[in-house]
Image (cartoon, rainbow, N blue to C red):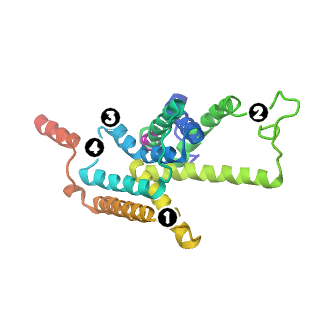
C-alpha cells in the first residue's frame, strides 16, 4: 500500500535529506577515527541542544522551560554515565569534523520529520525515495575515503579488494545491512510519529538501558559517577515522557495557544 499510493516527489526535494544522511554516516565515523572516544561521546550528547537551536531558527519552535530542564538533566546524566575519557581532541581537523558531524546529524533528524509533512509521505515512502540517491552518493565517496586496492598487484588485506571474504564475514555484512535498514526505518517512524527531540530522548534511554544491563547481566562495574548519571538521566527521561503524555491527553481547547494561532485568530476577528 505504501508503494501503490506513492506520491510524486521531485529529486531536488529529497536531495538535501539524502546528502544529510550521507554526511551523518561519513562524518560520525570519521569523527570517531580522528577524535578520542570521550570527544565522540560529548558530540553525540550535543546533538539535542543543536537540534533545539535549529528548530528555533528554522521553524520558530520554542520548547517550554520544563522541556529544556528535562533535556539538560538527560544530557548531564548521559555525560556522567558514559564519558570515561575526559581528554578532548587536540586535532584541529578532528574538531572541525566533530562539529560538522553534530550539525549534519541534527539537520538530518530535523528533515526526517519535516520532509514527511512537506511531501505528504509516510516513513516507508520517504525512505524509498531518498535511499537510492544516498546509495549513489556513498558509492562515489567509497573510493575516495576507503582503500580499494584496485590497482595493486597484491592488494593488502585491509583493502576492499584484498579482504578475504568468508561465509562468516559475508553473513555479518548482510546482517549489518539489514539492521542498518531497520535502524533507518525506525528513525523515520519515531520522528514521524513524535518529534526529533523525542527520538534523541529514546536514543539516550537505549544508552542508559545498555549500561544498566551490562552491570546487571554481565557484571560490569557500576561506579558512583555511572550510577549518578543513570539516575539523573532516568529522572530527565521520565519527566520528559510525563510531559509529552500529559500534552497528548490534554484536550485541544485547554492547550495553550501558540503565537501563530493567536495571530491567525486576531486576523479572522478583524475580517469579521
Label 1 Cα neighbours within 10 Å, binned few <14 / some 14-19 / many ≥20: some
From what the image shows, is residue 176 above or below residue 220?
above
**Front-most of residues 14 and 51:** 51
3 or 4: tag closer to the N-terminus: 3
Please indicate whether residue 105 sits to the left or right of residue 174 in the image.
left
The spot of residue 60 in percent (x, y) is: 29, 38
* Quadrant position of residue 264: top left
Circle 2 sits in a helix, a strand or a loop, which is it?
A: loop
**Contact between labelled residues 4 and 3, with CB atoms less than 8 Å apart:** no
Horizontal and vertical percent position of residue 253: 20, 56
Dot 2 surroundings within 10 Å: few (below 14), some, or many (20 or more)? some
- The mark lying in front, picked from 1 and 4, is 1
**Which contiguous range is marked in magenta?**
110-114
Q: CA distance from mark 4 to mark 2?
A: 47 Å
Q: Please report the residue visible at 45 percent of the width from the left and 60 percent of the height from the top.
A: 205
Helix, strand or loop for disc 3: helix
Which dot marks residue 80? none
- The residue drawn where x is 37% and y is 44% is 49
- Residue where numbered disc 1 is placed: 209
The tag on residue 57 is: 3
Q: Quadrant of the C terminus?
A: top left
- Marks 4 & 2, CB-CB < 8 Å contact: no
Mark 2 and mark 3 lie on one chain; the one further toward the N terminus is: 3
Residues at circles 2 and 3 in contact by the CB criterion of under 8 Å: no
Which residue in the structure is indicated by mark 4? Answer: 62
Mark 3 vs 1, N-terminal side: 3
Could you say whether the residue bearing mark 1 is in a helix, strand or loop?
A: helix
Can you say whether 269 is above or below 73 in the image?
A: above
The answer to whether residue 5 is seen in the rendering is: no
Nearer to me, 165 or 2: 165
Q: Is residue 5 magenta?
A: no
Amino acid at each position: 500500500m505504501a508503494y501503490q499510493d506513492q506520491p510524486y516527489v521531485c529529486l531536488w526535494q529529497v536531495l538535501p535529506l539524502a546528502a544529510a544522511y550521507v554526511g551523518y554516516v561519513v562524518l560520525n565515523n570519521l569523527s570517531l577515527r580522528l577524535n578520542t572516544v570521550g570527544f565522540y561521546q560529548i558530540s553525540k550528547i550535543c546533538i539535542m541542544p543543536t537540534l533545539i537551536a535549529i528548530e528555533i531558527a528554522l521553524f520558530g519552535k520554542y520548547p517550554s522551560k520544563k522541556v529544556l530542564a528535562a533535556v539538560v538533566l538527560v544530557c548531564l546524566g548521559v555525560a556522567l554515565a558514559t564519558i570515561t575519557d575526559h581528554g578532548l581532541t587536540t586535532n584541529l581537523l578532528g574538531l572541525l569534523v566533530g562539529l560538522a558531524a553534530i550539525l549534519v546529524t541534527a539537520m538530518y533528524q530535523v528533515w526526517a520529520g519535516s520532509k514527511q509533512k512537506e511531501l505528504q509521505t509516510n516513513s516507508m515512502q520517504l525512505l524509498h525515495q531518498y535511499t537510492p540517491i544516498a546509495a549513489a552518493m556513498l558509492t562515489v565517496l567509497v573510493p575516495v575515503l576507503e582503500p580499494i586496492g584496485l590497482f595493486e598487484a597484491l592488494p593488502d588485506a585491509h583493502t576492499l579488494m584484498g579482504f578475504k571474504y568468508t561465509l562468516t564475514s559475508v553473513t555479518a555484512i548482510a546482517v549489518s545491512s539489514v539492521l542498518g535498514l531497520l535502524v533507518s526505518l525506525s528513525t523515520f517512524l519515531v520522528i514521524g510519529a513524535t518529534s526529533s527531540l523525542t527520538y534523541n530522548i529514546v536514543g539516550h534511554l537505549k544508552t542508559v538501558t545498555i549500561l544498566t544491563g551490562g552491570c546487571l547481566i554481565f557484571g560490569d562495574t557500576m561506579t558512583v559517577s555511572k550510577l549518578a548519571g543513570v539516575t539523573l538521566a532516568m529522572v530527565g527521561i521520565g519527566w520528559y515522557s510525563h510531559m509529552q503524555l500529559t500534552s497528548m491527553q490534554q484536550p485541544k481547547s485547554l492547550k495553550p495557544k501558540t503565537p501563530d494561532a493567536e495571530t491567525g485568530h486576531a486576523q479572522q476577528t478583524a475580517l469579521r
